[in-house]
Image: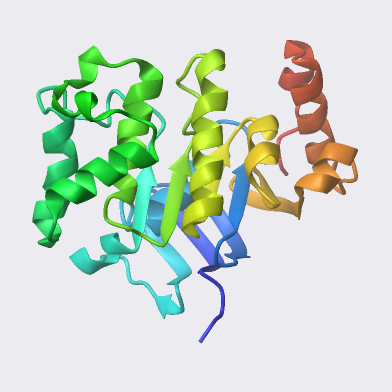
């Protein structure tokens, strides 16, 4: 049995004729935050969707806490793995109060002490009890994303998948949500996989990072090496240059993976 919390080996994902992920392999240690970076369309979010069971069109190995996964997951899987999506508004039901949003997963899994669990989840994400009976449209973008995180952690999973969790938020709010996630990482022992196009976000959260281009992981490195520019692949060098300079011309010049 593997001692990794997550092990991905030779993962391939197809959408019709599109080969979206090609032979991706990596492993994540328990309690680690592992980053996956790349441009839009590079395949990074597709990996998360295959991992959490949203996309069954994959081959290869997906192993969670030492257990190989099939294309279709039992309900019990979602006590272990939860996902936070990019857009907090579209991921919350507009006609459900925050109380109902947090109550539903507890009811589905038959968990006891729902009142205590809801209060605790809101406290963990820095929201007062008064938010409980509000609707999503009554919250700011950052508050909605905090609710989405609360919904994910209320089941006490061991693995949290984060798909661009701050990209839909104002820059002033992004740091608040990232710091919240960092506190959860340190305080709860969660294992996290963070997908982002923003190297600064990944450097803040992660210890190791996979760089994707054209559906492939072209390089795996540490965030310390990223900060220092000690990277191997030309694509990663160009991605770093685009991030540091915010130069649209540099971003457009990124070479496609051949």
Residue plotted at (69% across, 34% down): 199
Q: Position of residue 23 (x, y in %)?
A: 59, 62
Q: Position of residue 42 (x, y in %)?
A: 58, 39
Name the quadrant of the C terminus.
top right
Q: Nearer the viewer, residue 235 or 142?
A: 142
Q: Quadrant of residue 27?
A: bottom right
Where 244 sits versus 227, above or below? above
- Looking at the image, how many numbered discs can be counted on the residues? 0
Relative to 233, is 84 on the left or the right? left
Residue plotted at (48% across, 47% down): 184
Residue plotted at (13% across, 27% down): 97
Residue 149 in sight in this render: yes
Where 125 sits versus 139, above or below? below
Q: Quadrant of residue 157?
A: bottom left
Q: Position of residue 244 (x, y in %)?
A: 80, 22
Among all residues in the image, which is located at the extreme bottom? Answer: 1
Residue 20 in sight in this render: no
Where 36 sits versus 198, above or below? below
Residue plotted at (28% across, 66% down): 77
Relative to 122, is 163 on the left or the right? right
Q: Position of residue 255 (x, y in %)?
A: 76, 32
Q: Quadrant of residue 64?
A: bottom left
Relative to 186, is 73 on the left or the right? left
């Amino acid at each position: 049995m593997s001692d990794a919390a997550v092990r991905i080996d030779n993962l391939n994902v197809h959408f019709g004729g599109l080969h979206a992920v090609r032979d991706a392999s990596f492993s994540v240690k328990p309690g680690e935050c592992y980053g996956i970076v790349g441009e839009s369309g590079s395949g990074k979010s597709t990996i998360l969707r295959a991992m959490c069971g949203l996309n069954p069109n994959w081959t290869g190995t997906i192993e969670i806490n030492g257990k190989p996964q099939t294309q279709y997951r039992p309900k019990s899987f979602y006590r272990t793995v939860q996902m936070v999506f990019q857009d907090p508004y579209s991921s919350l039901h507009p006609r459900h109060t925050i109380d109902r949003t947090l109550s539903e997963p507890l009811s589905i899994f038959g968990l006891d002490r729902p009142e205590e669990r809801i209060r605790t989840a809101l406290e963990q994400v820095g929201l007062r009890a008064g938010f409980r009976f509000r609707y999503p449209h009554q919250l700011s973008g950052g508050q909605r994303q905090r609710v989405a995180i609360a919904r994910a952690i209320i089941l006490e999973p061991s693995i949290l998948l984060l798909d661009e969790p701050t990209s839909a938020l104002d820059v002033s709010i992004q740091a608040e949500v990232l710091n919240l996630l960092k506190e959860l990482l340190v305080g709860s022992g969660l294992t996290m996989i963070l997908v982002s196009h923003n190297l600064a976000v990944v450097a803040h959260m992660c210890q190791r990072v996979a760089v994707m281009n054209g559906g492939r992981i072209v390089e795996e490195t540490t965030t310390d090496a990223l900060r220092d520019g000690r990277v191997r692949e030309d694509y990663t060098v160009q991605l770093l240059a685009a991030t540091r300079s915010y130069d649209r011309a540099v971003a457009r010049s990124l070479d496609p993976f051949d």
